[in-house]
């Protein structure tokens, strides 16, 4: 049997038992929305990058180096190990990530580049790129989205630059781990880095949304930072998580040869921010080829002030249910990927209506409700039932489920 070859981002890879890339995802790898002129994702990136260029300079030059064209293909070492994510951690599961094969995957976050960029000697950098996660289907989730990551390193001299008593201040001590700091950091250093991190992010949010934006900091956990925080922003009356951040685990810096520095890092979701900034109601609009959508973002001198007008009037979603018995190794993300491949984006949302296991036969059955609505044109009932039938057929064929219809 000849091994199957996969083409991803201009390179070739062997297929193996880890491979779970779908055609839809392979398509998305080619799109690079963050590099497309006048696309809302690239506009969002530009506004943030310009903010950092303008406000952080040394001798008139920007201190942050920007990387927006690193390949999304990384190794599990880059995506997990270099960030101290334990080898048995749930986030490595095949059901949550897109693996090219056992040795390569599509990055699940831009943090996958931190180690390499720090190792290359950089003290301040921003990474922008497409990231990939298998996930549920609704108006704010898409298996591909874009992150912007910022990292800034400080040595003692830089961190304590404004204090009078420089000689007695130090970044490091042999202390104990506390809620506020890592064991090896002094409290004053940790507090200064945390303050610098939060102020840098807050000033960026003020720049984007104006002074009336409501933000709040929540304690969080990431294996690669301590302490860790999340920033939530009020959006349509709800608090929405926009970014994760924290003080980088010293072990990561030490392994990358930056043992005399401390660092903060943040990673933010560009879609979430763009949806808020431009009033975009559904994440699928970012993938639209419709002129009526794209033209709204073209040729603006002040991107921040664009307000998006959805293209169709609010036609109600049409829905159909689908129920089936699943084989033992089934995971719901397999079904969501299948829907994405079959339905070419006319599915707005999927709700799990019911899941139960028959205690006698030990078989599990699911019922999903699939909501159909196109982002920019009305759908007719016939078209929707045809897609839904195709979906049923494909579920039996590819997922080995036992249809209950
Ligand atoms: N990589 C994290 C995520 O994707 C975000 C993050 C980046 C958190 C940097 C802390 C520091 O959720």
Image: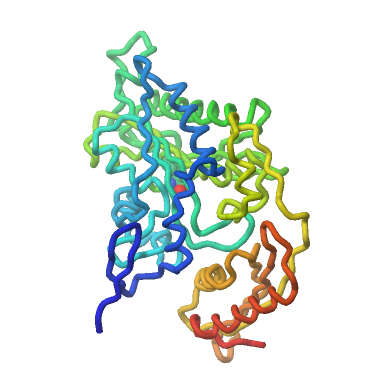
- Looking at the rendered image, the quarter that the C terminus falls into is bottom right
Residue in the foreground of this view, choosing between 214 and 174: 214
Q: Is residue 224 visible?
A: yes
Relative image position of residue 133 (x, y in whole percent)? 47, 58
Relative image position of residue 279 (x, y in whole percent)? 67, 43
Relative image position of residue 375 (x, y in whole percent)? 67, 57
Q: Residue at x 31, y 58 (%)?
A: 10
Q: Residue at x 62, y 79 (%)?
A: 356
| Residue farthest along the left direction in this orientation | 257
- Looking at the rendered image, the quarter that the N terminus falls into is bottom left
Relative image position of residue 349 (x, y in whole percent)? 65, 64
Ligand 1: image quarter: top left
User: Is 91 drawn above or below residue 163 in the view shown?
Assistant: below
User: Is 100 drawn above or below residue 69 in the view shown?
Assistant: below
User: How does the figure colour the protein chain or chains?
Assistant: rainbow
Q: Is residue 221 visible?
A: no
């Amino acid at each position: 049997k000849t091994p199957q070859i996969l083409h991803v981002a201009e390179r070739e890879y062997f297929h193996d038992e880890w491979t779970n890339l779908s055609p839809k995802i392979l398509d998305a790898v080619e799109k690079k929305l963050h590099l497309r002129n006048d696309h809302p994702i690239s506009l969002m990136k530009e506004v943030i990058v310009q903010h950092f260029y303008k406000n952080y300079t040394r001798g008139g030059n920007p201190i942050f180096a920007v990387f927006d064209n690193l390949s999304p293909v990384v190794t599990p070492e880059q995506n997990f190990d270099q960030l101290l994510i334990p080898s048995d951690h749930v986030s490595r599961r095949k059901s949550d990530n897109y693996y090219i094969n056992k040795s390569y995957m599509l990055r699940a976050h831009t943090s996958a580049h931190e180690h390499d960029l720090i190792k290359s000697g950089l003290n301040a950098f921003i990474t922008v790129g497409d990231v990939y996660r298998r996930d549920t289907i609704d108006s704010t989730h898409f298996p591909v989205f874009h992150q912007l990551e910022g990292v800034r390193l400080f040595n003692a001299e830089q961190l304590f630059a404004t204090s009078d008593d420089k000689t007695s201040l130090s970044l490091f001590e042999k202390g104990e781990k506390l809620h506020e700091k890592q064991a090896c950091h002094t409290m004053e250093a940790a507090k200064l880095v945390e303050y610098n991190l939060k102020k840098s992010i807050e000033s960026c949010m003020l720049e984007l949304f104006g002074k009336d934006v409501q933000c709040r900091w929540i304690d969080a956990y990431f294996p690669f930072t301590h302490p860790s925080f999340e920033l939530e922003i009020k959006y349509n009356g709800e608090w929405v998580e926009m970014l994760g951040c924290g003080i980088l685990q010293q072990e990561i810096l030490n392994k990358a040869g930056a043992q005399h520095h401390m660092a903060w890092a943040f990673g933010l979701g560009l879609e979430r921010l763009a949806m808020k900034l431009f009033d975009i109601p559904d994440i699928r609009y970012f993938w639209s080829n419709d002129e009526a959508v794209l033209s709204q973002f073209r040729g603006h001198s002040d991107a921040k002030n664009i307000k998006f007008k959805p293209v169709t009037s609010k036609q109600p979603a049409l829905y159909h249910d689908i129920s089936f018995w699943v084989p033992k190794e089934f995971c719901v993300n397999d079904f969501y990927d299948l829907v994405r491949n079959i339905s070419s984006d006319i599915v707005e949302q999927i709700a799990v209506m019911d899941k139960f296991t028959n205690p006698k036969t030990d078989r599990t059955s699911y019922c999903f409700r699939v909501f159909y609505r196109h982002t920019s044109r009305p759908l007719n009932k016939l078209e929707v039932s045809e897609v839904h039938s195709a979906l049923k057929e494909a579920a039996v064929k590819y997922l080995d489920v036992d249809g209950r219809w």
